[in-house]
Image: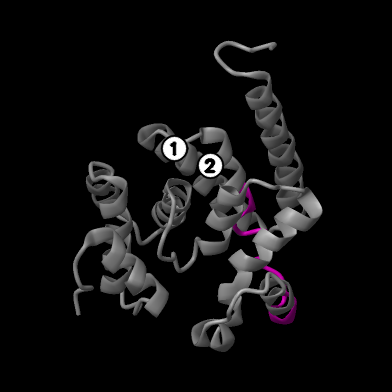
Amino acid sequence: MATSGNMSSIEVEGAARVAVACTRIESYIRAQLSSGRLQHVLGVTEYAEYLAESFGESPARARLAALGHDMAREWDVEKIRTWGISDGLPVSPLESEVPKILHGRAAAVLMKEQFHVCDTEVIRAVRTHTLGDVGMGRLEKILFCADYLEPGRPYIERDFRVRVEQLDLDEMVCACVEHNTNRGHEPAERTISMYRELCGREYPT
């Protein structure tokens, strides 16, 4: 079996598919997103790759998830709702009340249907990046944290980012949730369930 370095031919083929998908999605977002949103996405992408390296995840897969995570963020609300619920998953009361939250689910559908991304962990990371979820894998946690801690975020103090980078990945997720709550944003029930699961304690009230 032909190899490239220590990679099998199957792994090389998979890496090539990820690279092609990244190229296509980056082209899409550069054409479709506002300059501010694009700058955020590229910042999340760079930081997700850094976290992936730190936590033993594939930087290429982290890049793919990060590039795609806000593809649908600037769609009109009805389009977000239509694409978001088309994944067939239950819709929470919060998602019904604030359909913009469905933009991750909409982006996940778009990545599967139009960009032929079949990596289920990448798709799930994009789907859950806003509220999180129970049972999150490493790639999901990385995107969740990268989106919140993105260096361009004006509300993220450098000292806070440096401090949480010393934590393990589960505690990093929980620190992000706590920080967001301290900013006055009450977490969703799904986020609280994730917090309990990852940190093994009740959410502080």
Residue extending farthest right = 114
The answer to whether residue 106 is seen in the rendering is yes
Residue density around tag 1, few if under 14, some if 14–19, many if 20 or more, within 10 Å: many
| Measured Cα–Cα span from mark 2 to mark 1 | 6 Å
Q: Which residues are magenta?
A: 67-79
Instruction: Say what secondary structure mark 1 lies in.
Output: helix
Q: Is residue 75 magenta?
A: yes
- Nearer-N-terminus badge (2/1): 1
Q: Which residue is mark 2?
A: 62
Q: Which mark is residue 52?
A: 1
**Residue 153 image position (x, y, % from top left):** 43, 57
**Residue 10 image position (x, y, % from top left):** 67, 25
Instruction: Say what secondary structure mark 2 lies in.
Output: helix
**Residue 109 image position (x, y, % from top left):** 70, 62
Check the image and report above or below for 2 versus 175: above
Q: Which residue type carries mark 1? A: Ala
